[in-house]
Image (cartoon, helix red, strand yellow):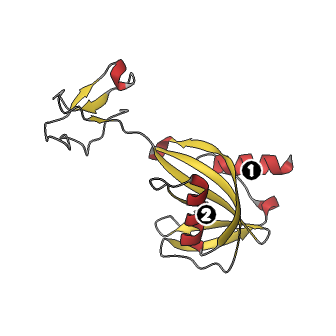
Amino acid sequence: MAGSNPDYRFCPRCAAPLVLRNGPQFGGLPRQACPDSACGFVWWDNPAPVVAALVEYRGRIVLARNQAWAEGAFGLITGFLERDEEPAAAAMREVKEELDLDASSASLIGVYPFTRKNEVLIVYHLVADGDITLNEELAEYRLIAPEKLKAWDYGTGLAVADWLARRRG
């Protein structure tokens, strides 16, 4: 159910048991909230902002496999946007952290919902160079010629489809 989180059973401010409430003051959705109106805590359950990078490296696109993913599952470089961080800078930071590449430019591809993980994806096309060195998060990577790149139908794959469509133009 939207707005509910089984991990939040008690108010993190006053420890009262949370109750499910609804109404215009809760955005029209059921929300877990503190019954103590003086406390005022509401679990909004807003999506987390995530940056993603479609990395162009020496004319090819980098796809990476996270250590936790199944064999053969590859995707874009992603990471959470930090407090007070500019999204394009965050995408460049993630590329540096995960691939040890320096990005020289970043252009916004688009913003996409990823409801399965309660995230909003802010996706950039980055041109990067250096020598690829994977961090501990990544198991392996592939370099794909742009004309061989295929989009997938969820998450960052939607941005890949948009980038490919603009490229064909």
**Residue 4 percent across, percent down from the top left:** 31, 36
The 10 Å Cα crowd at callout 2, few under 14, some 14 to 19, many 20 or more, is: many
Of the pair 65 and 71, the residue shown nearer to us:
65
**Residue 30 percent across, percent down from the top left:** 33, 26
Secondary structure under tag 1 reads: helix
Question: Could you tell me the amino acid type at mark 2?
Answer: Met
Quarter of the image where one finds residue 22: top left
Question: Could you tell me the amino acid type at mark 1?
Answer: Trp
Asked if residue 156 can be seen in this view, the reply is no
Q: In the rendered view, would you say 20 is above or below 51? A: above
Which circle marks residue 92 in the picture?
2
Mark nearest the camera among 2 and 1 is 2
Asked if residue 54 can be seen in this view, the reply is yes
Of the pair 131 and 64, the residue shown nearer to us:
131
Q: Residue at x 62, y 72 (%)?
A: 141
Q: Residue at x 25, y 28 (%)?
A: 20
**Residue 114 percent across, percent down from the top left:** 53, 44
Which circle marks residue 83 in the picture?
none
Residue at mark 1 = 163
**Residue 58 percent across, percent down from the top left:** 77, 72
Q: Is residue 133 left or right of residue 44?
A: right
How far is mark 2 from mark 1, CA to CA? 18 Å
Q: Earlier in the sequence, mark 2 or mark 1?
A: 2
Q: Residue at x 79, y 61 (%)?
A: 146
The 10 Å Cα crowd at callout 1, few under 14, some 14 to 19, many 20 or more, is: many
Q: Residue at x 37, y 39 (%)?
A: 45
Q: Is residue 10 left or right of residue 71?
A: left
